Image (tube, rainbow, N blue to C red):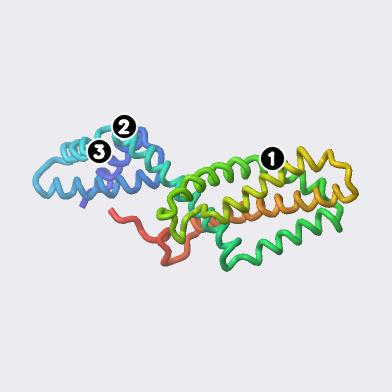
Amino acid sequence: MLTTDQLAAIDRHLRKDNWLLNEDLIAELTDHYANAITEAMEQGKAFDSAMANVHQSFGGRKGLLAMEETYQTEKAKHIDTMVWREVRRMMQGDRWPLVPVTLCTLLALNTFAGASETVDSFFTIAIWYVGFTVLLAMGTAAVALLRPATISVTAPTPSFFVFAYGLSLALLAVNKYWLSGLSVYNAREISLMINTLLQTLCVVYYIAIILTMRKLFFPKKGSPLSAPKQG
């Protein structure tokens, strides 16, 4: 069993000597270092020598920094997958009532409440972030669809999402470059409906992000996210 000072030395080694920043990775590495050093010390090695051997087993500072970069990339992919699973639950799963409720709420605000300009202002900046993220996810899904065998029930972006958000981008283009210059009786009403549909898809994505963040920061007991890390 390592002392408090020895554990503090491992923490300094990872943070100051090797420039690591990711707290989750540091916690995992601390456990690994502690277990490996304890085993080495039981065999008669000194603490400093044992820590140096563990450090070298990871490839030194270069290896640890590369590990942190990979760790952060994989975590980002995992979060993205969780977000799209929440989107799927709202479009094809048990949370589907959220979609018609959102659509009806936005439609009421845009029409009966006459607040379409206020709603548009709210989405002006945020829609660019959603658009970029959706396009990236659609690109990934399009590649995956060429290899159907790789798509599972929990796939983050199956064909349904490619269709739904692809349709939204097509409607956006029609609304901006064609319908706005078309002189027809109900052009304004059609444009308003298209905007409402696009806004609904954005809100669905926002809700998915919020639900994912809640799972990450407040995991339920018994879920994989709440399970203690193993050394």
* Residue 213 appears anywhere in the view: no
Task: Determine which residue is flagged by label 2.
Answer: 17
Q: Give the residue displayed 69% in from the left and 40% down from the top.
A: 125
Q: Position of residue 170 (x, y in %)?
A: 68, 45
Task: Determine which residue is flagged by label 3.
Answer: 58
Choose between 217 and 139: the one closer to the eye: 139
Q: In the structure shown, which secondary structural element does the residue marked by tag 3 occupy?
A: loop
Looking at marks 1 and 2 on the same chain, the residue that comes earlier in the sequence is marked by: 2
Task: Tell me, yes or no, whether the two marked residues, 3 and 2, touch with CB atoms within 8 Å.
Answer: no
Q: Amino acid at mark 1?
A: Ile
Choose between 95 and 216: the one closer to the eye: 95
Q: Alpha-carbon neighbours of circle 2 within 10 Å: few (<14), some, or many (≥20)?
A: few
Q: Give the residue displayed 29% in from the left and 34% down from the top.
A: 63
* Residue 76 appears anywhere in the view: yes
Task: Determine which residue is flagged by label 1.
Answer: 125
Task: Tell me, yes or no, whether the two marked residues, 3 and 1, touch with CB atoms within 8 Å.
Answer: no
Q: Position of residue 199 (x, y in %)?
A: 71, 51
Q: In the structure shown, which secondary structural element does the residue marked by tag 2 occupy?
A: helix
Up the image or down, 222 lies above or below 168; here it is below
Q: Give the residue displayed 73% in from the left and 59% down from the top.
A: 103
Is residue 86 rendered to the left or right of residue 177? left
Alpha carbons under labels 3 and 2: distance apart: 14 Å
Q: Alpha-carbon neighbours of circle 1 within 10 Å: few (<14), some, or many (≥20)?
A: few
Is residue 2 rendered to the left or right of residue 121? left
Q: Give the residue displayed 58% in from the left and 43% down from the top.
A: 135
Q: Position of residue 206 (x, y in %)?
A: 62, 52
Q: Position of residue 118 (x, y in %)?
A: 80, 47
Looking at marks 3 and 2 on the same chain, the residue that comes earlier in the sequence is marked by: 2
**Foreground: disc 3 or disc 1:** 1
Q: Amino acid at mark 2?
A: Asp
Q: Amino acid at mark 3?
A: Phe
Alpha carbons under labels 3 and 1: distance apart: 43 Å
